[in-house]
Amino acid sequence: MYKLSFTYLLLLAWFLTGCSGKESSQGNNQTEAQKEAAKKAPQAMKNILFFGNSLTAGYGLNASESFPSLIQKKIDSLGLPYKAINAGLSGETSAGGRNRIDWLLRQPVDVFVLELGANDGLRGIPPAETKKNLQAIVDKVKAKYPEAKLVMAGMEVPPNMGGKYASEFRVIFRQLATENNMALVPFLLEGVGGVRSLNQQDGVHPTAEGQKILANNVWEVLEDVL
């Protein structure tokens, strides 16, 4: 009787150990499967709002040649979950942008790229007024989407606007970036402004090749933000 009970206990222990190991193995397999599924699951898409004038809109070119569209291609090639929204409007001033931004903020904004001021400069609008309008735009974005990341595209005016004016105008973009913790593209038209072959006949708006350089100028800063 003793021998039978002992044999029975050994078989029972072996059975329970086997079942426990099997369940543990299944649990590990499920955990690994869940991890793999999480990696493959599509990430929620985030919006990058490019808010600007004709430089952003890609005046005189196909929409696909504008720098926001070119940046979208870079984003797609890297598999990043971002959608570039081109909200450029030809002729837009900082005052016009201040009035227009509310409508665009109806959609979610995760990254905000501000490119305005060039038309103010060409019209000789006082830099202090331009800065005030740009600050108002930034304030509205921060109020609606406090977690949004902000990028400022710097701008300069031609020397014929006068040295004093050009200097005062140039500095407002850096000031705004510093005061609002924004990433700064020092000069959007770096490498393009004043280069005849990279601008259309009007000498102001970049060609398709010029837009590629603008995209690179912005991407050097935006890549780190994303």
Image (spheres, rainbow, N blue to C red):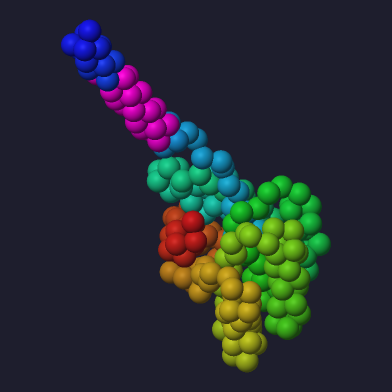
Q: Answer whether residue 85 is magenta in the image.
A: no
**Nearest to the observer: residue 5 or residue 122:** 5
Residue 167 in the image, given as x and y percentages of width and height: 59, 87
Residue 107 in the image, given as x and y percentages of width and height: 71, 47
Image vertical order of residue 190 relative to residue 46, above or below: below
* Residue depicted at x 65% and y 53%: 109
Residue 162 visible? The answer is no
Image vertical order of residue 161 relative to residue 214, above or below: below
The image quadrant that residue 173 belongs to is: bottom right
Residue 63 in the image, given as x and y percentages of width and height: 57, 45
* Relative side of 100 to 10, left or right: right
**Nearest to the observer: residue 70 or residue 208:** 70
Q: Quadrant of the N terminus?
A: top left
Image vertical order of residue 187 relative to residue 81, above or below: below
Residue 189 visible? The answer is yes
Q: Answer whether residue 33 is magenta in the image.
A: yes
Task: Farthest residue to the right: give it.
Answer: 99
Task: Farthest residue to the front: give it.
Answer: 1
**Nearest to the observer: residue 139 or residue 172:** 139
Q: Which residues are magenta?
A: 14-36
* Residue depicted at x 66% and y 71%: 117
* Relative side of 65 to 93, left or right: left
Residue 65 in the image, given as x and y percentages of width and height: 51, 48
